[in-house]
Image: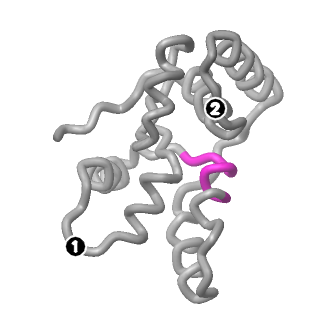
């Protein structure tokens, strides 16, 4: 199973023409039923869509991927990851560390284009999904 970050979802919905390796990987994961979704990724993906019709269309597509419940210990782990990385000079968003905590707790990898996750991986035990270039 793979937790897919909002940057990959957004590109998949936005881009026309040639798809990146990340979007191709997402398509494969979707077809294999390997995608994990959480509410904050859903929110980030849907945020900023100006046209209501397009928003509703993307919202409806994402509804095929129910959000996994995030328990209190996962939020606490996210805070611990934030603190650990920050103490090592690595900054990141609360959502990024929540994604990391979910991935660690659920033993899933993360598909993202965000290079910050490579920096987090030096300090916390996340597994990044490897796309084939």
Quadrant of residue 14 in the image? bottom left
Residue 95 spot, x, y in % from top left: 67, 40
Mark drawn on residue 65: none
| Residue located beneath label 1 in the image | 17
What residue is at 63 percent from the left and 57 percent from the top?
Answer: 44
- Asked whether residue 41 is drawn in magenta, I would say yes
Residue 110 spot, x, y in % from top left: 46, 34
- Relative to 55, residue 8 above or below: above
Mark 2, residues whose alpha carbon is within 10 Å: few (<14), some, or many (≥20)? some
81 or 70: nearer the eye? Answer: 81
What residue is at 70 percent from the left and 22 percent from the top?
Answer: 82
Does label 2 or label 1 sit earlier along the sequence?
1
Residue 33 spot, x, y in % from top left: 39, 48
Quadrant of residue 86 in the image? top right
- Its colouring scheme is one colour
Mark drawn on residue 92: 2
Region in magenta: 37-43
Mark 1, residues whose alpha carbon is within 10 Å: few (<14), some, or many (≥20)? few
Please tell me whether mark 2 sits on a helix, a strand or a loop: loop
């Amino acid at each position: 199973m793979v937790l897919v970050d909002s940057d990959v979802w957004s590109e998949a919905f936005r881009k026309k023409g040639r798809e990146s390796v990340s979007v191709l990987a997402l398509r494969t994961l979707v077809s294999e039923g390997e995608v994990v979704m959480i509410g904050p990724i859903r929110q980030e993906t849907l945020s900023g869509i100006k046209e209501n019709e397009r928003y509703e269309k993307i919202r409806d597509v994402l509804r095929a991927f129910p959000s996994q419940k995030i328990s209190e210990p996962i939020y606490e782990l996210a805070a611990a990851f934030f603190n650990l990385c920050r103490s090592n000079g690595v900054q990141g968003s609360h959502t990024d560390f929540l994604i990391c905590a979910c991935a660690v707790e659920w033993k899933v990898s993360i598909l993202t284009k965000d290079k910050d996750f490579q920096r987090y991986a030096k300090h916390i035990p996340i597994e990044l999904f490897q796309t084939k270039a």
